[in-house]
Amino acid sequence: MCGTCAAEMEKKLHAVIDRHRDTRGALIPILHEAQELYGYLPLEVQRTIAEELETPLAEVYGVVSFYSQFTTTPRGKYRISVCMGTACYVKGAGEILDRLKARLSVDVGECTEDGRYSLDACRCIGACGLAPVVTINDEVFGKLQPDDVDEIIDSYDKKEGQV
Amino acid sequence: MNKVNMTIDGIQLYVPENYTILEAAKEAGISIPTLCFLKDVNEIGCCRMCIVEVEGAKAMPAACVHPVSEGMVVRTHTPRVMEARKVNLDLILSNHNARCQTCSRSMMDCELQALANKLMIEDVVFEGESAKLPLDIGTSIVRDPNKCILCRRCISACKKIQSVGVIDIVGRGFDAHVGSPFGIRLEETPCVNCGQCINYCPVGALKEKDDTAKVWDALYDPDRVVIVQTAPAVRVALGEDFNMPIGEPVTGKMVTALRMLGFDQVFDTDTGADLTIMEEGTELIDRIRGGGRLPMITSCSPGWIKFCEHNYPEYLDNLSTCKSPHQMFGAILKTYYAEKNGIDPEKIFVVSVMPCTAKKFEAARPEMSVNGLADVDAVITTRELASMIYDVGIDFPKLGDSQFDDPFGSATGAGVIFGATGGVMEAALRTVADILTGQSLDNFEYEDIRGLEGIKITTVEVADLKLRAAVAHGLGNARKIMDAVRAGEHFDFIEIMACPGGCVNGGGQPLQLSEVRSWKDVRAERAKGVYREDMKSFIRKSYKNPAIKKLYKEYLGMAGGSRSHELLHTHYKARDNYGKSPLPE
């Protein structure tokens, strides 16, 4: 735990809140930026936002739990999203997802213990022509076969200096 | 107010333009079914039970939120409306855990059941997946989200009225449910256990933690001396659970019933209230004369205490150090009374019948004990007492009257008015004024601090003192007055009750369905009962209570003395809001 990093992050969070607090409907933009900052929205972050906006935490949590793009569990360095839209689904996204789960030993919404990968199933991302599609951070992988999964993960592991 | 002409079911009406269709129909004597609606609390039109047809409109608007307008023609019971209501109700029923046989509300308090009967639902058409969520069982409150119908009345009560806001809608679509953040148990959130959510719940999704089994066990234990005490607000509401009029005092019948249930002694918490006044009145005078911390704030309402611990910890030293009346009384029963009657205090089992769910949590606090013995062993609500009376088949309305037992049977009118907002302050002022002037003043009714105004502020002159006093009820109002104090406004004495209207409207009181609550002020009716009891009392000032005089003479010495402090006073500590872990990196 690095005390200075935590303090610096907290400063940034307060800056985010201050920037939005006087506008109507400030909560959602604040949540978005807070999630960008921390990667996820844990209780402590939500509580800070709630206290600053003088809004009950339950209301903040209600909003976070409503929108699927918000998450309360830590995300990995590489955020893997498997598109489960109709086209991807019929083209075998389910199997891709299963392979990823097995390879990473995590369930949907979870993060590997080393913090490297997190796995999500998302709604249609609009790349149906490439179905089935997986995104890892900003990179897009299309027309996947289940066997491609290992290769892709291997390439990321390699980037991290570990096979 | 401008008025508009409109027609509902062929009846021509001329109503204020700020009326909703529901209010206009009500005035015309037409009953439109509602479920989520609760006037002034929850007016959001989410259950779609009150939909009606409006001529010229394509969709069917919800009558509870749709305003009237000039020339509007409304039909409330067309086949299209009836069919749509049925489908909506069917959908609600399809995800309701209908274990009615074992539900606390099934006897007469379930609005969902009443509505299903009214709309003649014969079977649940849409059988499908149903939610299976864990129960949340606390010391005071039990939540069963599987019975919840998402009407959001509890959320409104908690957030809007009480400004506590520990529950809200969580999730989306089929997964949506009423819950606390991160699924934390209610008891570990800043919930204050006031139970207002229970009073507003139309079904059995919220109820008090049932402690009647504990009480029955004690009653049937031959080694136990089981003593019951009843709070002032219980007597003006208990009858409602037996179809008696709202606010009708049933003190004598209640005492009879308690004896029939097998309690060894039946005492009146009003005596505890008189004792509280002696201690709190003395404390107030001492604080003012001795430059103590002001304003002094009353500490009888355990919902308010927990609210203060969470939200205004820097004012904990402003709280009167007095325990609440039933705790004081419990402490006296296990010391003075036990000694005097040669009873081993360990054998005494004190049961408090309270209008309050927060009292359950209060009685379980470690602060509330003397010599390792809890002041009070079990707290049951007015509703739980009613269910015990039902259980043994007592025909309550037909019972004759009995008197409370001596030596604590002679409580004063000052003790009774504790049940209504403003009552604790009035009771205190009655005694403080006489102590300070050294005479028995005839003018002791403080009308300014009675009534249902959310915050009442007045200046009281007693002897050479000029007190600026405030009374707030409902925690939303408490927050306002505390924010004013924080901002530097000066008060000498503040009474705060967690529940709107005070204890008469506590979270443990008999339930009144929304169709009653929406149009009649239950709080006012019950408060009338309380003041009627006060008027009837032979003694109306706490310090004149002979039992109290004797108690001080034989045991406590003087009010605010060392023995009092050991038995009757306490302190509170600040509480976290959802834990204290730091922000992550």
Image (spheres, rainbow, N blue to C red):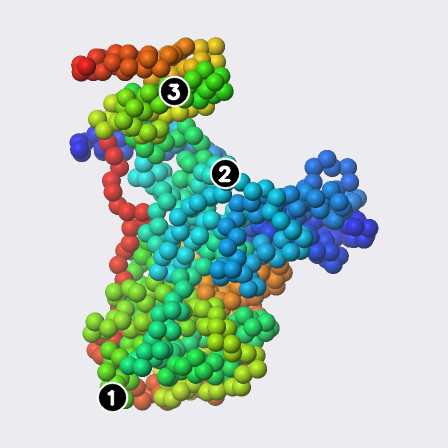
Identify the residue under disc 1: B342
Q: Chain of mark 1?
A: B
Q: Give the image location of residue B321, x and y in percent.
A: 29, 69
Can marks 1 and 2 be said to lie on one chain? yes
Q: Amino acid type of disc 1?
A: Gly
Chain-order first, disc 1 or disc 2:
2
**Residue shown at 76%/46% (left/top)?**
B78
Pick the residue in front: A15 or B44. B44
Q: Nearer the viewer, mark 2 or mark 3?
A: 3
Q: Chain of mark 2?
A: B
Q: Amino acid type of disc 3?
A: Glu
Q: Residues within 10 Å of mark 1 (few under 14, many from 20)?
A: few
Identify the secondary structure beneath mark 3.
Answer: helix
Q: Give the image location of residue B474, x and y in percent.
A: 46, 59
Of the 4 image quadrants, the one containing the C terminus of chain A is top left
Q: Is residue B306 visible?
A: yes
Q: How many marks?
A: 3
Can marks 3 and 1 be said to lie on one chain? no
Identify the residue under disc 2: B174
Disc 3 and disc 1 in contact, CB within 8 angstroms? no
Q: Chain of mark 3?
A: A
Q: Amino acid type of disc 2?
A: Phe
**Residue shown at 24%/88% (left/top)?**
B342
Identify the residue under disc 3: A95
Identify the secondary structure beneath mark 1.
Answer: loop
Against A142, residue B378 (above or below) is below
**Residue shown at 74%/37% (left/top)?**
B57
Disc 2 and disc 3 in contact, CB within 8 angstroms? no
Identify the secondary structure beneath mark 2.
Answer: helix
Against B34, residue B222 (above or below) is below
